[in-house]
Amino acid sequence: MRLYVTGGNGFVGSNIVKVALERYNAAVFSTVHSRLPEGAPDLEYAPVNMVDPQQVLNSVRTFQPNAIIHAAILNNFELMYQDRKLAWQAYVDSTRFLVRAANEVGAKIILVSSDWVFDGTQVDADEFTPPNPINLYGVLKLVAETVVTETAENGAVARVSAVNGVHWFQPNSPLTQNVGLGNMIPAVVNALQRGQRFSVWEGDINMHATPGLASECAEMMLRIIQRDCRGIFHCCCGQRVGRMELAKAAAKIFGLDAGLLQTGPPDWSGMVGVPVPCDTSMSARYTAEQLDYTLPDINRILQIYHRQLETGRLETQTG
């Protein structure tokens, strides 16, 4: 497999790269802003301006992948709303340029999308539930999904949900709680390991989801490629949980004091006035059937994550 990854030095991207290299023996190329951080694995990479169609096409032509995973995003809500043209270019135009390049070289393309394409009232939305985003991020992801499903000759969409786990290229980067459930587990664990109280946010934020462990999300995406699946897929676990339920489960698996957990109001820094979907839980049963994959529950995800932190190695469930 020759795999072209955008944003391979990001959190989700680092897991895609690691799983592709270690479990699928793939040759991997990653786009980067400047260079990969020290300690990154041996792979090809180069700076690519994702909103320049000729740069994107030239880069894909040079590497000649048989699969592309588009994981790069503009990960800044404040900037997204301040510069909507830039946001559109970063999410929609970049996807369009990659699809054109994929079609030219005959590569499969997977777009990494999000449970935030749903409005927060569509509980346990499955792969065929019509989306209804309520903020700009969700709209941009949905439009990019449509670009892939309507124009890619061989395309798939991998929606992830509340992603937690190890950033393999920056394992010591501080992770904090946000209005979604992504990074919730490491934020809780880091605080409780230091004996600090942790305030689990409550309010008009993302209160329920079906979290995914980044390495398991990556495994599911590689299976989409391996099995040449097409369409919409949900790359997450098999259990809907709330914020406090997730925090308590993390404390139990890591052997930490759940008595340090409390509730409190969210910090809206950088997201003032942005509507957030309350319940973005997704059903992934169809995806699991297509990929011959056993959906883990929350305890299983936490156990795998715990082992990854202890060993510094990629741990992936079998099945």
Image (cartoon, rainbow, N blue to C red):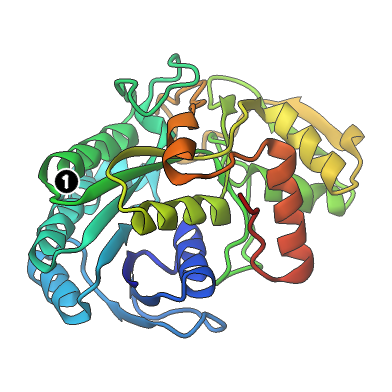
Q: As drawn, is 277 to the left or to the right of 184?
A: left
Name the residue that disc number 1 marks.
Answer: 85
**Residue 298 visible (yes or no):** yes
Image point (26%, 32%), residue name:
139
Q: Position of residue 177 (x, y in %)?
A: 62, 42
**Residue in front for this viewpoint, 230 or 102:** 230
**Height in image: 3 above or below 151?**
below
- Element at badge 1? helix
- Give the mark count: 1
Q: As drawn, is 1 to the left or to the right of 216?
A: left
Q: Position of residue 260 (x, y in %)?
A: 88, 36
Task: Work out which quarter of the rendered image holds the N terminus and state it.
Answer: bottom left
**Height in image: 114 above or below 74?**
above
Image point (44%, 79%), residue name:
36
Q: Position of residue 8 (x, y in %)?
A: 41, 67
Image point (22%, 42%), residue name:
144
**Residue 71 visible (yes or no):** no
The amino acid sitting under disc 1 is Lys
Q: Position of residue 239 (x, y in %)?
A: 62, 29
**Height in image: 222 above or below 8?**
above
**Height in image: 64 above or below 138?**
below
Image point (86%, 54%), residue name:
194
**Residue in front for this viewpoint, 296 or 143:** 296
Q: Residues within 10 Å of mark 1 (few under 14, many from 20)?
A: few
